[in-house]
Amino acid sequence: MSEPTPFNDLKTAKRIVVKVGSALLVGPDGAAHGVWLADFAADVARVRARGQQVVIVSSGAVALGRRRLGLGKRALTLPEKQASAAAGQSALMRAWEEALEPHGIACAQVLLTRDDTEVRRRWLNARATVETLLGLGVIPVVNENDTVVTEEIRVGDNDRLSARVAQLVGAEALVLLSDVEGLYTADPRRDPAATLVARVARLTPEIEAMAGGANAAAGMGTGGMATKLEAARIASHAGCATIITLGARPGPLAAVEAGAAATVIEPGATPSAAYKAWIAGSLAPAGFLTVDAGAAAAVRRGNSLLAAGVTAVDGRFDKGDAVVIRDEAGLEIARGLIRYVAEHARQICGLKSGAIEPALGYTSGPMVHADDLALAAHAESA
Ligand code: GLU
């Protein structure tokens, strides 16, 4: 893995994921907070005008839905929460559409479950959809698919969901807009010596201890400071910096750029290095692809593996599973995520790219895309 890169600036991240909590988005009357949304939309439009891509992870479905359903402020049962989410999600999207439209920005609803970020095939599908939206200049507005998930299989809070989304899209920055300025060394309401931790290079047990006690109550939504640091840990492993800051100020992103109080947790690597380390290290291979000398050389140079260069396919695997790529001598040269199910990979093995669609009735492009390939350590140094 490459050396940790110090986080430069919100101005330089190509992709930014911003998490907006219910407390910001839903006003005291239980309706969408139009004034805050309009201000934030202008802030997002400004960032996008510099050529940066933005993904919004937005809570608020349950809060908006409970009002629609007349459930008041009482504690909700899980089915009532799910019903509220179902009723509120459309109100939430309407609020985002109304806020972004004056800037000529379209948005799209993306509802994810934990499986979508954990099961590789679904992960690849979710990633392809979000990538397509970003490519079209649309802002994906992500929330958990609360109506179908049960307690055991939920992500549960949008702090963690937003970190997984940051990983999904290879974002360089994750901004958690919160009702606190960041992480404090102690409870600022009780300890006059408490100071804001401006930068965290690494999430140590000492830092994590700060999230207990003093900061535990921070955040009115589902997640307190501990879930924010948990999100930061996921993001950091994915090569993404996390910025915890106050969301209620005007232009919260502009404010951070101008040096407003915030806690920045630095990433452990670049998103692409982290992704490749994940492919190389954490996935048990489900199959083997043997490739000819030309394809082996192409893969070593960092190119995609085309079906034409594959001479044998072994194993049972699904689309999105990890496979080992080896040369004709059996030496492992790389690992990657395959784009075809085993049966189809066998059918197209040796075929030129143009012959894949006639053979299968569809094409998913190369057998393994360069972005999803991690070279074996010895192959990289060769
Ligand atoms: N998904 C929930 C909602 O939209 C919120 C979860 C959270 O705030 O962390 O209401």
Image (cartoon, grey):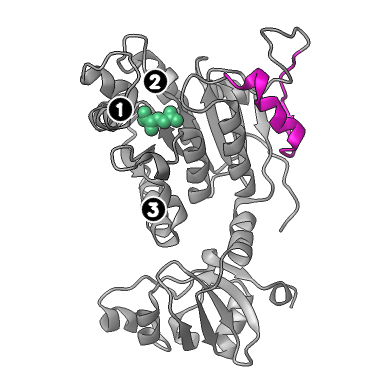
Q: Can the viewer see residue 178?
A: yes
Label 2 and label 3: CA atoms lie apart by 25 Å
User: Which numbered tag is attached to residue 92?
Assistant: 1
Distance from label 1 to label 2 (Cα)? 9 Å
- Cβ–Cβ below 8 Å for labels 1 and 2? yes
Local SS, label 2 = helix
What is the CA distance from the residue labelled 1 to the residue labelled 3?
Answer: 21 Å
| Horizontal and vertical percent position of residue 89 | 28, 31
80 or 196: nearer the eye? 80
Give coordinates of residue 365: x percent, y percent. 39, 72
Q: Is residue 105 left or right of residue 51?
A: left
Quadrant of res 295: bottom right
Instruction: Classify 10 Å Cα crowding around label 1: few (below 14), some (14-19), many (20 and above).
Output: many
Question: Which mark is on residue 126?
Answer: 3
Relative to 205, 32 lies left or right: left
Give the image quarter of residue 79.
top left
Confirm or reject: label 1 Cβ below 8 Å from ligand 1. Answer: yes
User: As shown in the figure, which amino acid type bears the numbered disc 2?
Assistant: Leu
Residue, x 61% and y 18% (percent of image)? 181
* Residue 107 magenta: no
Q: Is residue 213 left or right of residue 105?
A: right
Which residue is the site of mark 2? Answer: 25
- For image coordinates 47% across by 27% down, the residue present is 222
The residue sitting at 60% across, 37% down in the picture is 230
Q: Inspect the image, locate mark 3, and give the three-letter code of the amino acid beneath it.
A: Ala
> Can the viewer see residue 45?
no
Q: Position of residue 346 (x, y in %)?
A: 39, 85
Mark 1 residue element: helix
The span shown in magenta is 194-217
Which residue extends farthest right? 193
| Number of dots carrying numbers | 3
Q: Amino acid at mark 1?
A: Leu
